[in-house]
């Protein structure tokens, strides 16, 4: 079973794949983490995280998991709940049971029907976006010059 198994339209690998058991850190269903969490490897969250979460690797948030923190990762697959801003370097996949309350910044975003997103999204190939910024409203075209 693959932790991340993203496929493109032709059935090939779209970006990332990690085999079950290869996650460097597993936060089990009965575990609650309080404070800042930092990792260089892949992380699987099945429990609760409060604070901040940052990994240079990939992140998987299983159904039933709850994160109340700003999140940063290279790639992420979310089926649980996140309350906080989410910054993903490459691919972010939201499963049908995902619930996000916060702003998202990523290069590639896929959302399954049923996922809930309450926040702003910035999807861009640009490497410059590392933190959520103030959302600007479009300029009004009512001005006459």
Image (cartoon, grey):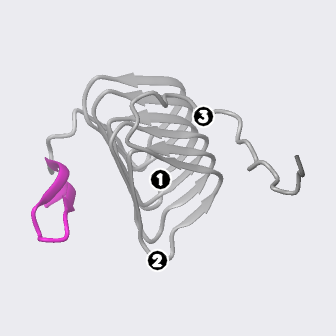
Residue stretch in magenta: 1-18
| On-image quarter of the N terminus | bottom left
Q: Which of the numbered marks, if any, corresponds to residue 12?
A: none
Contact between marks 3 and 1 (CB within 8 A): the answer is no
The residue to which callout 1 is attached is 65
| Side of 42 relative to 117 (left or right) | left
Point out the residue furthest to the front here. 145
Residue at image coords 65%, 33%: 133
Residue 6 higher or lower than 145, as above or below: below
The residue to which callout 2 is attached is 113
Mark 2 neighbour class, 10 Å CA radius: few under 14, some 14 to 19, many 20 or more: few
The residue to which callout 3 is attached is 132
SS for callout 1: loop
Residue at image coords 44%, 41%: 31
SS for callout 3: loop
Residue at image coords 31%, 27%: 56
Distance between mark 3 and mark 2 Cα atoms:
25 Å
| Residue 108 point in image, percent of width and height | 36, 51
SS for callout 2: loop
Q: Quadrant of residue 134?
A: top right
| Side of 140 relative to 130 (left or right) | right
Residue at image coords 19%, 58%: 5
Q: Is residue 12 magenta?
A: yes
Mark 1 neighbour class, 10 Å CA radius: few under 14, some 14 to 19, many 20 or more: many
Closest to the observer, 89 or 30: 89
| Residue 67 point in image, percent of width and height | 54, 44
Choose mark 3 or mark 2, whichever is in front.
3
């Amino acid at each position: 079973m693959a932790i991340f198994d993203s496929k493109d339209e032709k059935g090939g690998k779209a970006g990332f794949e990690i085999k079950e058991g290869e996650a460097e850190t597993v936060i089990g269903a009965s575990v609650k983490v309080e404070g800042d969490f930092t990792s260089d490897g892949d992380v699987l969250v099945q429990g609760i995280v409060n604070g901040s979460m940052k990994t240079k690797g990939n992140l998987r948030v299983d159904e039933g998991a709850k994160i109340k923190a700003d999140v940063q990762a290279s790639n992420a697959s979310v089926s649980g709940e996140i309350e906080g801003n989410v910054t993903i370097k490459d691919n972010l996949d939201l499963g049908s049971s995902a619930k996000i309350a916060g702003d998202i910044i990523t290069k590639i975003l896929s959302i399954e029907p049923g996922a809930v997103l309450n926040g702003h999204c910035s999807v861009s190939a640009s490497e410059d976006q590392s933190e959520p910024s103030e959302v600007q409203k479009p300029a009004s075209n009512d001005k006459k010059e």
